Image (cartoon, rainbow, N blue to C red):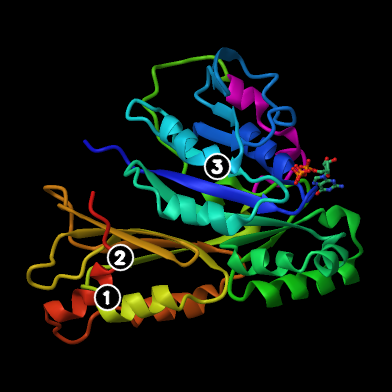
Amino acid sequence: MAKRAIPVVLVAGFLGAGKTTLLNHLLRNNRGVRIGVIVNDFGAVNIDSMMVAGQVDSMVSLSNGCLCCAVDVSEMDSMLDRLAHPRSDIDVIVVEASGLAEPRNMVRLVLGSENPRIVYGGLVVLVDAVEFEDTRAANPELDLHVRMADLLVLNKTDRISEPDLRSVLARVEELGGRSPVLPTAHGRIDPRLLFDEVTRVDDGPRQLSLDELLTDPHDHDCGDHDHLHDRYEAVTFTSAQPMDPRALIRLLEDPPPGLYRVKGFVYFGIPGHTQRYTLQTVGRQIRFETGPWGRRAARVTELVLIGTGLDADALARRMDDCVRIHESGAEAMTGVHRYVVEN
Ligand SMILES: Nc1nc2c(ncn2[C@@H]2O[C@H](COP(=O)(O)OP(=O)(O)OP(=O)(O)O)[C@@H](O)[C@H]2O)c(=O)[nH]1
């Protein structure tokens, strides 16, 4: 079976916004997901408590499957290739940009990569809630970075008063357009927003893994196990009726505010195009792959739509409007085929 492409998530943000803090949070709360990491500076990444199995050049291989490399952006391409080599057991790659990096170049590099084993996983831009107004006054390019983001993380909310938080949140939402904005402290976002959990074959009873032991206690000490879930919503859509390709593409190209990811299968049922269309979107990036339906799989559309601040009812109505009412010919598939990636 062909291996799934590895999403590459880019984490950017001005100096000190909390990128390394967020990365360490993801590593500690990886839920079994093997994260390959590309950073500019080894020092700050919390790998000391993980077992270092070996070191080759600037790459460290960890027993739990994480790999960390110290690179500058110009080396990123070859580092991605190394992390995504055919025998790699990495599930997701997270790149921490330096505080002064230009995210546009990194996005281009990932989107333009010829490596079929990687796929763009989104640009996350961290914003320091306390410093944002001063920093953007001195560094106007910051506004551009915020505009480019697929997901904005408004960090350090523990250090700001409620009225100031409201005002900086409004500013970031205004600059970010429709991109979801996630207020947080210490970069503690739910990793499931960025990447999927993986199911691995379990080989019987075992001791707690190092990953589980390292899981950030802060995520469990408030007595409310669902508190992380509150910050994002997932809307599930299922339809046994075929979908209207044009209507679906319109929704994906003009998504409702706050929508960050869409994933699942689509059935268009148009003669010549009845195969299974696997859909993955991150921010504005849309990607379809075609493939056969399993032998017993029902021809149905099943999508999960994930974001923050979503109006779930309005989104469900928009999805209902994408169900095909009229017969369509193959020409209706043109919009979809612009986003089909050969696999
Ligand atoms: N109070 C508070 N401190 C934070 C938060 N997030 C990060 N910090 C602290 O802010 C400082 C900078 O955080 P880093 O994660 O190193 O920031 P960075 O973006 O990686 O910084 P550079 O690599 O210099 O660009 C550290 O001392 C963190 O402990 C937060 O939400 N609240």
**In magenta segment, residue 221:** yes
Residue 223 image-quadrant placement? top right
- Around disc 3, counting alpha carbons within 10 Å, would you say few (fewer than 14), some (14 to 19), or many (20 or more)? few
Question: Residue under circle 1?
Answer: 335
110, 129: nearer the viewer? 110
- Around disc 2, counting alpha carbons within 10 Å, would you say few (fewer than 14), some (14 to 19), or many (20 or more)? some
Give coordinates of residue 282: x percent, y percent: 47, 60
The quadrant in which the N terminus is found is top left
Secondary element at tag 1: helix
Residue 270 image-quadrant placement? bottom left
4 to the left or right of 158: left
- Taking the image in four quarters, ligand 1 sits in the one at top right
Residue 213 image-quadrant placement? top right
Question: Residue under circle 3?
Answer: 74
Q: Amino acid at mark 3?
A: Ser
Q: Amino acid at mark 2?
A: Tyr
Residue segment shown in magenta: 210-227
Q: Looking at the image, can residue 269 be seen?
A: yes
- Residues tagged 3 and 2 counted as in contact (Cβ below 8 A): no
Q: In terms of sequence position, does the residue under pointer 3 or pointer 2 come before the other? A: 3
117 to the left or right of 96: left
Measuring 58% from the left and 28% from the top, which residue is drawn there? Answer: 68
221, 94: nearer the viewer? 94
Give coordinates of residue 133: x percent, y percent: 85, 68
- Give the alpha-carbon distance from disc 2 to disc 1, as whole Å: 7 Å
Q: Amino acid at mark 1?
A: Gly
116, 230: nearer the viewer? 116
